Image (cartoon, rainbow, N blue to C red):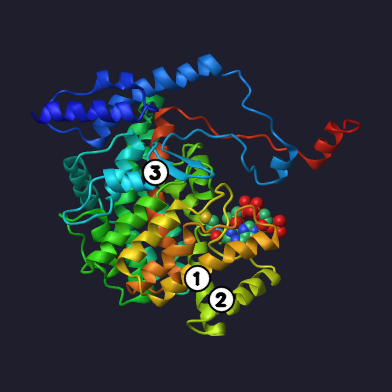
Amino acid sequence: MATALRTRSLLQSNQRFTSLSRASLRFASTGSKPLTLKERLAELIPSQIDQVVKQIRADHGKKSFGPVLVDQLYGGMRGLPALIWDGSVLDAEEGIRFRGKSIPECQALLPKAPGGSEPLPEGLFWLLLTGEVPTQEQVRALSRDWAARAAIPEFVEEILDRCPPTLHPMSQFSLAVTALNHDSAFARAYQEGISKKEYWQPTFDDAMDLIAKLPNIAGRIYRNVFGDGKVPAIDLEKDYSHNLAALLGFGDNEAFVELLRLYITIHSDHEGGNVSAHTGKLVGSALSDPFLSFGASLNGLAGPLHGLANQEVLIWLRKMQSKIGENASDDAVKEYVWSTLKAGQVVPGYGHAVLRKTDPRYTAQREFALKHLPNDPLFKLVGQVYDIVPGILLEAGKAKNPWPNVDAHSGVLLTHYGLTEMQFYTVLFGVSRAFGVAAQLIWDRALGAPLERPKSYSSDAIQRMFKDKH
Ligand SMILES: CC(C)(COP(=O)(O)OP(=O)(O)OC[C@H]1O[C@@H](n2cnc3c(N)ncnc32)[C@H](O)[C@@H]1OP(=O)(O)O)[C@@H](O)C(=O)NCCC(=O)NCCS
């Protein structure tokens, strides 16, 4: 019965997710024990290599994918088609889809915790890696596996304990993640002469360790910087988000745990080209192990135009409140927004390099707020700002996208539940982003992704190239 159900679910998921070859079904095991994530991946990888990647390269490898404009060289490579990542794709109008599934679809389809209504990030990780919606049992096994791997080495604890509390939590986070490279299975296997074909296996093990250890790192940073330095133990029977919440001191608040489940899911991945995802891929392409690669991702995420914007939004909102007071009029808010722009600053949480509509990650958080904290004064201010800022950015005429992104909303939710230390917010983004970066690193090693090496040009070369050509 269990086998028949699993085979049917494999069939359905493969019909739904066409990016992983349907032919992979013939690799599906018929044993009675449910497949682990690693076993299922081992089944999927050969067909993805032979029937998708090799086939596309054989059929279309020499075809042009469109022009490259000189503006793109100077313009941060906006829109330049340059990377492959099947896990998630970002549409400018519609927003992110994880393996073809929108955020509302993921909320509906992915397994939930008992009594919960938000998706478990464990399921999202399975989806990112396989293109399949896992069973409750598979997700449960993943929760247990991560809880069992969660301990961090003592020397990493010491590194964190020695950091001055004035060192930004993101710098501490990056230090600790980088130091985990001490025990990297991939680095060890490489030294021992592992074959290229096997690279993905120790990468998978490292990726699992990386994700599993992040709650302990994040919890320790939070408790050291903002609390008494005492970090509780991981509960082997609880899911990832519950454990993270408990380590931060919010394990008893079920609504906060639900928020974290949603938060991690929607922050996990945003296709391959954003700074943190691309940095992980780039550094990983040198065969740096997942700890080194993700440490680099975190350094990118710590920038104010990327993940740090969630901290910046709260700082900006608080400054606004202290200047114009609570329950301020629309006119007072408008004046404050204009004063930000006139001072040559960006309005944090608004605009996006790819999106041209309201970020569905913003909408998912707004819906959560409407359900759980409709009367929160800061939520009301966020809503008021949403009504005002797009019109002003349009009038100012520079930003290509006047609409809010994910960072415009996350801080108000965390603040509502008492996690008020905004310098910590990007760490939670970082925990979430590990899911996407780790999944991408595993597939890159499985597909034999080569060292990244785009070509750079001097301005002089470009001037000479187009001299006398109009
Ligand atoms: C996300 C962001 C970096 C994208 O940058 P981008 O792709 O260069 O955006 P655009 O092409 O729309 O930028 C065109 C101009 O509008 C400005 N602009 C974009 N978003 C703006 C905002 N929220 N407030 C003020 N100005 C903004 C840019 O700074 C740029 O100005 P410039 O020509 O003087 O350099 C940008 O929108 C931004 O800085 N937003 C605020 C920070 C933020 O929320 N980051 C998190 C993103 S998920």
The residue that appears at 53% across and 40% down in the rendered structure is 282
Give the amino acid type for the residue marked by disc 3 in the picture: Ser
> Looking at the image, which residue sits at the far right?
468
Secondary structure state at the residue bearing disc 1: helix
Near-viewer residue (65 or 223): 65
Q: Which secondary structure, mark 3?
A: loop
Q: Residue furthest left?
A: 1
Alpha-carbon span between mark 3 and mark 1: 26 Å
- Between the C-alphas of marks 2 and 3, the distance is 33 Å
Residue at the disc numbered 2: 330
> Do the residues bearing badges 1 and 2 touch, measured as CB atoms within 8 Å?
yes
Q: Is residue 125 left or right of residue 304?
A: left
Neighbour tally class for label 2: few under 14, some 14-19, many 20 plus, Cα within 10 Å: few
Residue 2 coordinates in the image, percent (x, y): 10, 31
Q: Which residue is mark 3?
A: 102
Q: Taking the image as four quarters, which one is ligand 1 found in?
A: bottom right
Q: Earlier in the sequence, mark 3 or mark 1?
A: 3
- What amino acid type should be assigned to the residue bearing mark 1? Gln
Q: Is residue 358 above or below residue 25?
A: below
Around disc 3, counting alpha carbons within 10 Å, would you say few (fewer than 14), some (14 to 19), or many (20 or more)?
A: some
Along the viewing direction, whichever of 34 and 360 lies nearer the viewer: 360
2 vs 3, front mark: 2
Q: Which residue is mark 1?
A: 384
Q: Residues within 10 Å of mark 1 (few under 14, many from 20)?
A: some
Percent x, y of residue 112: 22, 50
Q: CA distance from mark 1 to mark 2?
A: 7 Å
Whether residue 187 is visible here, answered yes or no, is no
Q: Position of residue 267 (x, y in %)?
A: 41, 53
Left or right of 85: which side holds 26? left
Is 391 placed above or below 91 here? below
Q: Quick one: 403 or 126, which is closer to the camera?
A: 403
